[in-house]
Amino acid sequence: MKFLDAPPRFLFFTGKGGVGKTSIACATSIQLATQGQRVLLVSTDPASNVGQVFGISIGNQITPVIAVPNLSALEIDPQAAAQAYRDRIVGPVRGVLPDSVVKGIEEQLSGACTTEIAAFDEFTALLIDSALTQDFDHIVFDTAPTGHTIRMLQLPGAWSGFLEDGKGDASCLGPLAGLEKQRTQYKAAVDALADPLKARLVLVARAQAATVNEAARTHGELAGIGLTRQYLVINGVFPATEAANDPLAQAIYQREQAVLASLPEVLRGLPTDQIALKAFNLFGLAALKQLLNRSVSPQPTPDTDAKTVVVMPGLTRHPAGPGSMDCGSEPAMTTAQPINAPSLAGLVDDIAAEGHGLVMLMGKGGVGKTTLAAAVAVELATRGHEVHLTTSDPAAHLMETLDGTLDHLMVSRIDPHEVTEAYRAQVLAVKGAKLDAAGRAVLEEDLRSPCTEEIAVFQAFSRVIREAGKKFVVMDTAPTGHTLLLLDATGAYHRDIARQMGAGAHFTTPMMQLQDPKQTKVLIVTLAETTPVLEAANLQADLRRAGIEPWAWVINNSVAAAKVTSPLLKARAQNELREIEAVASRHVSRYALVPLMQEEPVGVQRLKQLSEQGVQA
């Protein structure tokens, strides 16, 4: 693999959600550790699943991976980091300042800005020479999906410049002293990121137009902040040998080859590797050891536990025959018959019955939230309902997915840059009008604080969901971790309003709307694979802790719900059955299964077909 030739100390894997960053980062760490290098694998994703991949509990502390000598791992937990950050700032003044002042500081530090900065502090601490990292030859970063990663990588320079220039008080972060102490650390992080001998950034994509275009955008943005030493990995490429005599397999192969033949110009000059699609789930040590091995033929991981398929209510499959590729699990299907399960159209029927409301699609990156949000919106608009389709994902491609217009359907995007500029202009117009020149200058500098974006995005989010009282608002959200941070800001705002209004007051906040099942329906989107289902279950638990009960799950791009004859696809379909059963029997009472389609669901007509499609591909 080219990206592993003479690797520097820091390796960053980034890309659009669902392209396989975690699997490749884990496989890279295992390979380096096996070669005798001391490796620290770090996840900066707020919805990290590195611990699940290895089957151990990691969390917010460096933890040895016992099964792999020389390998340790760390999951930067934003909430734990935020609490440590608050304790570091509030601790010295507790008992010294009046309780009312201390409480005020704690309120300032309760929002998403503090959570982001605290996680960022831990991130930069890993980029400097310190006792924390001195025992490791390599530090491998499994990053959050692209938009959040770019934000994280931009922050060292943004905060370093903000502090060096002696800017405003950054009120949403509390006392500036908490940042001033980190000035040297931030500068060292900037220097490390910009040094190609120390850091290498690996763009991960699939052979899909959306992920390749995202990689091209990421390349430009990261090159602009000094990360010029970039490599490209195209993951999960469909093998040519599997394309014969299977219309779905042939369609996938041809579609991918067309994308690879027309890579954006900025990517063509990068050192590039391709990793073939595997038939087995990339979960567990045995599977990860095979991922970067070019000689491995597609086959299920040999340590798959033998289990009996439980056929759930509403889900049936045709009997299997001989010729299985599976290694110890249930027999693989040898016919081309798909299973039967509830369709997306059934969910839309129930949603439409309300006449209006907020529909939020949430989940891990790469599971197809944008496509399914567009499909739901198109179906509702086709039925004559007024619909506002929007996204809070910085890397969304709603317009490309729709590829057209439709009566009753309005489309928008919460663009972080645009809403931040609008927020700054509004604050300057209202508060700045009452200030003299010196005061206005201070306000302008304070509004250049990197955390201003969090406030602006939250306000835009709140404005959009208020529309759901009169029409349908369908929201394609950012990947899980970033969405949870947005919900954290929503919760902080709710607590602040409740404190100000006092007991007995009548008011409605965005969080109260999200918690009301009559006003909001949350659809968790997943794939029928081990890691996405685990992450969906974790997201459901997080939402429930916030008082938000998910309404349904949607299992997208299911091979088991399609008609296939390719051995690789049949093996993948067989692996899906266990996960579909888990969703239906353990995680949720309402779900839909959407089959993998021969043609990409782009354009109003295909999106409508996707919504109406049962499980017969």
Image (tube, rainbow, N blue to C red):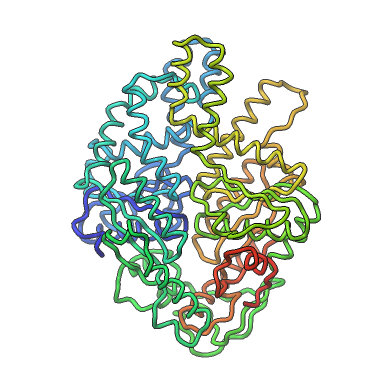
- The image position of residue 470, as x and y in percent, is 77, 43
- The residue under the point 35% across, 39% down is 123
In the image, is 299 to the left or to the right of 583? left
Residue 584 in view: no
- The image position of residue 204, as x and y in percent, is 37, 58
Residue 341 versus residue 525 in the image, above or below: below
Residue 318 versus residue 236 in the image, above or below: below
- The residue under the point 42% across, 19% down is 168
Closer-to-camera residue (165/125)? 165
Q: Quadrant of residue 121?
A: top left
Name the quarter where the N terminus is drawn.
Answer: bottom left
In the image, is 586 to the left or to the right of 302? right
In the image, is 258 to the left or to the right of 374? left
Residue 366 in view: yes
- The residue under the point 24% across, 59% down is 4
Name the quarter where the C terminus is drawn.
Answer: bottom right
